[in-house]
């Protein structure tokens, strides 16, 4: 069924709200940005924001989802070097750090954010595990045992989150990513 004018206007209004929320959340932080401020920046009434988004957590997830989709190229960097792909991913998360920090800060109080966070990490862990496996094959190395791969993925996730949280300069990010890749060697038990 073709879209009618009301559908198009609804989508446009939702995008205006997301644009405003994204600008404010990234510039000022999620916690200090009220729904009233988002409404004002979008040029709508506060009730309108709640018409589209149940609460601030739902708005945060919509903004975060959109930002991740817009920056999805970082996940698919075609650089032949795994370390370079990891540097790109760190750059992606550094750009949206205020959003991910807000999610982490609210995990214990928001079931919506906790559920999203668990799904996000499950997906990113699968992606990272595949990247590591492809790299090992390309180097003529044996794959890691599943439990070892899971541990390496967890270590890399903590490293990426730490580089972002501590606002590491790009040279340091590059060094850390190169060391992580250089240490990818199956253990004797594998």
Image: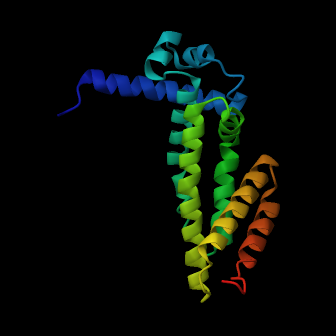
Look at the image and tell me whether residue 45 can be seen: no
What residue occupies the far left of the structure in this picture?
Answer: 1
Q: Quadrant of the N terminus?
A: top left
The number of discs equals: 0
Seen in the picture, residue 142 relative to 14 is either above or below; the reply is: below
- Front one among 125 and 10: 125
Instruction: From the top left corner, tell me how far across and down residue 109 is, in percent.
Output: 66, 29
Residue sitting at 69 percent across and 39 percent down? 104
Seen in the picture, residue 21 relative to 104 is either above or below; the reply is: above
Q: Is residue 40 left or right of residue 159?
A: left
Residue sitting at 72 percent across and 34 percent down? 105
Look at the image and tell me whether residue 71 can be seen: yes
Give the image quarter of residue 163. Answer: bottom right
Give the image quarter of residue 9. Answer: top left
**What color scheme is it?**
rainbow
Q: Is residue 80 left or right of residue 32?
A: left
Instruction: From the top left corner, tell me how far across and down residue 43 is, in percent.
Output: 52, 15
Q: Quadrant of the C terminus?
A: bottom right
Residue sitting at 58 percent across and 32 percent down? 111
Seen in the picture, residue 182 relative to 20 is either above or below; the reply is: below
Instruction: From the top left corner, tell me how far across and down residue 70 is, in percent.
Output: 51, 46
Give the image quarter of residue 11. Answer: top left
Q: Is residue 139 left or right of residue 13?
A: right
Q: Is residue 102 left or right of residue 56?
A: right
- Front one among 90 and 27: 90
Instruction: From the top left corner, tell me how far across and down residue 152 is, in percent.
Output: 69, 68
């Amino acid at each position: 069924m073709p879209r009618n004018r009301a559908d198009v206007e609804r989508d446009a209004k939702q995008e205006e709200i997301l644009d405003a929320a994204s600008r404010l959340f990234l510039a000022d932080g999620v916690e200090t940005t009220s729904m009233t401020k988002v409404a004002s920046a979008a040029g709508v009434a506060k009730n309108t924001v709640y018409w589209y988004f149940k609460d601030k957590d739902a708005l945060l997830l919509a903004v975060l989802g959109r930002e991740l989709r817009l920056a999805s190229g970082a996940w698919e960097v075609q650089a032949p070097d795994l370390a370079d792909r990891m540097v790109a991913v760190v750059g992606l998360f550094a750009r949206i750090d205020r959003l991910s920090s807000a999610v982490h800060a609210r995990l214990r109080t928001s079931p919506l954010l906790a559920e999203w966070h668990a799904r996000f990490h499950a997906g990113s862990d699968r992606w990272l595990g595949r990247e590591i496996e492809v790299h090992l094959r390309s180097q003529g190395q044996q794959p890691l045992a599943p439990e070892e791969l899971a541990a390496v993925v967890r270590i890399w996730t903590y490293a990426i989150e730490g580089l972002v949280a501590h606002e590491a300069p790009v040279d340091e990010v590059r060094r850390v990513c190169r060391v992580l890749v250089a240490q990818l060697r199956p253990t004797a038990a594998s």
